[in-house]
Image: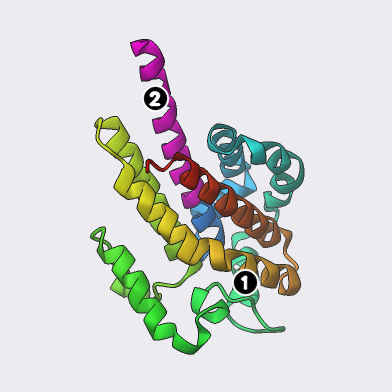
């Protein structure tokens, strides 16, 4: 019986670490481009990694990822061209209106300061705050994805140490319910409507699907 229990613990840790990495890669892909991530999506390394970790933590999505999403994530343009596409898609409103990667643009429009304060509270509860040098607000999609990355990693650490991960699981459920799962479908729809670059369309689709599936997983596994 101990071997069965130990195997389940190891499997749970592996799944938590894989979930954390999925959130990290989604944040990387939807964040401001850098040369390292561009290279990873150009040579396929990050796409292969996504496939491998989805097989572990979201097997119901892995087949669709392989067939429909992964082919659209392979970049064939130069880094400079990719950076220009990102800017036109999400920041400059040129030559057409850009899609917004901010929660406060999609929901809580009339009281965005309250939204920012709530997000700051979530982050502060776990000793986190936005990098002052980055000039980014707390409601950016990348910040929220990175927060879920952090919480899933902390869950894995607790599981490795033989401690209760309940607090981290509850935080994940609450954050997904109150934030990511609420507005990711809206930003995905806007990206579909305004962005023609298939890399971003495919990644937004994966983000919506993974967030929804992950919320159901956290609800199911949360200890009462």
Q: Nearer the viewer, residue 125 or 24?
A: 125
For residue 181, say whether it is visible.
yes
Residue 79's image quarter?
Answer: bottom right
- Please name which of the two marks, 1 or 2, marks the residue nearer to the observer: 2
- The answer to whether residue 52 is above or below residue 46 is above
Residue linked to disc 1: 84
Residue linked to disc 2: 10
- The answer to whether residue 156 is above or below residue 6 is below
Q: Nearer the viewer, residue 90 or 164?
A: 164
Q: Does the stretch in magenta take in 73?
A: no
Which image quarter is the C terminus in? top left
- x, y (%) of residue 3? 37, 11
Figure label count:
2
Q: Main secondary structure of the magenta part?
A: helix
Task: Bin the neighbour count of mark 1 within 10 Å (Cα to Cα): few under 14, some 14-19, many 20 and up.
Answer: few
Task: Bin the neighbour count of mark 2 within 10 Å (Cα to Cα): few under 14, some 14-19, many 20 and up.
Answer: some
Q: Nearer the viewer, residue 35 or 9?
A: 9
Q: Nearer the viewer, residue 99 or 212?
A: 212
- The answer to whether residue 80 is above or below residue 45 is below
**Region of the chain picked out in magenta, as a range:** 1-24
Colour convention: rainbow
Left or right: 125 in relation to 65: left
């Amino acid at each position: 019986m101990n071997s069965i229990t130990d195997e389940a613990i190891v499997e749970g840790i592996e799944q938590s670490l894989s979930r954390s990495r999925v959130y990290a890669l989604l944040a990387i892909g939807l964040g401001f481009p850098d040369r390292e991530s561009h290279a990873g999506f150009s040579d396929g390394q990050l796409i292969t990694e996504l496939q491998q970790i989805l097989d572990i933590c979201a097997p119901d999505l892995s087949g669709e990822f392989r067939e429909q999403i992964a082919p659209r994530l392979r970049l064939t343009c130069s880094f400079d061209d990719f950076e220009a596409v990102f800017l036109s898609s999400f920041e400059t409103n040129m030559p057409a209106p850009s899609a917004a990667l901010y929660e406060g643009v999609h929901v809580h429009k009339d009281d965005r300061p309250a939204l920012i304060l709530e997000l700051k509270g979530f982050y502060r509860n776990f000793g986190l705050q936005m990098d002052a040098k980055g000039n980014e607000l707390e409601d950016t999609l990348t910040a929220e994805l990175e927060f879920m990355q952090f919480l899933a990693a902390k869950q894995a650490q607790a599981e490795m140490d033989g401690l209760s991960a309940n607090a981290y699981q509850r935080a994940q459920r609450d954050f997904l319910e109150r934030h990511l799962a609420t507005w990711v479908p809206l930003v995905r729809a806007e990206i579909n409507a305004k962005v023609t670059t298939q890399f971003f369309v495919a990644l937004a689709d994966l983000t919506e699907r993974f967030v929804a599936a992950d919320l159901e997983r956290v609800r199911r596994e949360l200890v009462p």
